[in-house]
Image (cartoon, grey):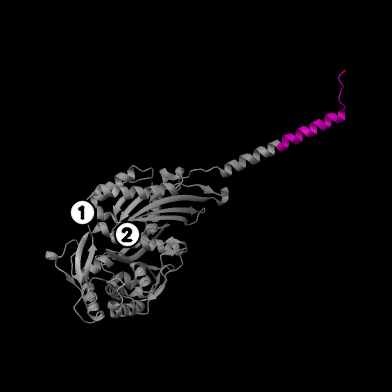
Amino acid sequence: MRKIPSHGSLRMTRVAYLLGLCVGLFIYVAYIKWHQASAPQVLSSIPGAAHIPVGSAAHAHEVFYGIMFDAGSTGTRVHVFQFARPPGETPTLTHETFKALKPGLSAYADDVEKSAQGIQELLDVAKQDIPFDFWKATPLVLKATAGLRLLPGEKAQRLLQKVKEVFKASPFLVGEDCVSIMNGTDEGVSAWITINFLTGSLRAPGRSSVGMLDLGGGSTQITFLPRAKGTLEASPPGHLTSLQMFNRTYRLYSHSYLGLGLMSARLAILGGVEGRPAKDGKELVSPCLSPGFRGEWEHAEITYRISGPKAGRLHEPCASRVSEVLQSKVHRAEEAGHVDFYAFSYYYDLAASVGLIDAEKGGSVSVEDFEIAAKYVCRTLGAQPHHSPFLCMDLTYVSLLLREFGFPGDKVLKLTRKIDNVETSWALGAIFHYIDALNRQKSAA
């Protein structure tokens, strides 16, 4: 005979059922919330970059990537940048991957097909560094500098077309303007963006900006934000440019001097002509080389026979020769002497080579430090054969170039390769500006 449950047992059963139902409902809701918070979603607030919100909805950070190829005169480098942007704030750089290959693209001017192998190798670095889901939305850009600017137009364009073909076959976001030769002003402005982005000046509108000096192989740049009305009024045509970033417009003093990069300056000081072998294989003699020195030097795929004078002191005649090369070629902006400047590339390398700064950490150097080093090296060059035969010439050139820019002897420059472990090249500023421009285009549309 079936036992009929009591009223007390029925009440206990109902309570247990309701309690179990509540616990199950709580677990289900908790799972749904966790799944929504952890599942990546693609956003589109900046076109040309993939985004993932990190954290809660109220504090999400948008993550996006950009790839910049720097095709310089001595090598091709790839920079893979990862950015994060908190809601309503300026983006920050969270990671960079860098790799360089030699020689530069210009070395393949007569064999364009060979250039593709190096470009593909660097593209593979980007593919390994960027998550697969971001590939289609990550902008891929190559900008060439002085090495290609010095090539005949047809040769340069053939190289760029080959790079574009390789880019279009890649899985990244490739625009019609993905491959180009940078004009010198853009190079200087991009480097200025980099240094002011890394030092925080672009994120704090009231904070003083810093100037930028770059000395490459084929060209040299100077860029700063003038405060004095006289600087704007006295600047020659082509020395002022406007930059729009973060909905602000900057009126910059920026100029690039093609042919005054360190390698091109060496050739000019030696008496050679860019892109041409010495006439009849003639030896190029320079007062900036050690007495009795003889050797060969290759520049832009041309080998030159070079030698020093038979006898005599070096620094004074060398300085005189360098002054002839620089005469009337550089505009002097007096305000530059009152702006904090960072200096890169060969400024850094030269200072490190003679112990003015730590080769790894960088440091600060005055214009007079370069001058003193030039005089010492020129006096002792013959007794120190382990040094580069060009060290007297290079240091003398840099010290006089800085004077031509308007810097007094006691002007201190900050020399660094990295800020917060990020390379201080123009590449960061260029890709950042490219993405910002894509964002403005979308907003305007």
**Three-letter amino acid code at the position of disc 2:** Asp
Image: magenta residue range: 1-23
98 within the magenta span = no
Examine the residues drawn in magenta and state their main secondary structure: helix
Please rate how many residues cluster around mark 1, counting C-alpha atoms within 10 Å: few if below 14, some from 14 to 19, many from 20: few
In the displayed image of the protein, which residue is found farthest to the top? 1
**Which structural element holds mark 1?**
helix
**Three-letter amino acid code at the position of disc 1:** Gly
Residue at the image position 65 percent from the left and 39 percent from the top: 29
Would you place residue 288 above or below residue 305 in this image? below
Number of the label disc, if any, that sits on residue 186: 2
Identify the residue under disc 1: 153
- The residue nearer to you, when weighing 432 against 234, is 432
Number of the label disc, if any, that sits on residue 288: none
Horizontally, residue 149 falls left or right of residue 204, namely left
Would you place residue 379 above or below residue 47 in this image? below
- The residue nearer to you, when weighing 300 against 294, is 294
22 within the magenta span = yes
Give the image location of residue 242, x and y in percent: 34, 61
Give the image location of residue 187, x and y in percent: 32, 60
**Which structural element holds mark 2?**
helix
Q: Quadrant of residue 1?
A: top right
Marks 1 and 2: in contact by CB < 8 Å?
no
Horizontally, residue 338 falls left or right of residue 13, namely left
From the viewer's perspective, is the residue at label 2 or at label 1 nearer?
A: 1
Mark 2 vs mark 1, CA separation in Å: 19 Å
Residue at the image position 37 percent from the left and 62 percent from the top: 191
Would you place residue 350 above or below residue 125 in this image? below
Residue at the image position 39 percent from the left and 51 percent from the top: 67
Q: Earlier in the sequence, mark 2 or mark 1?
A: 1
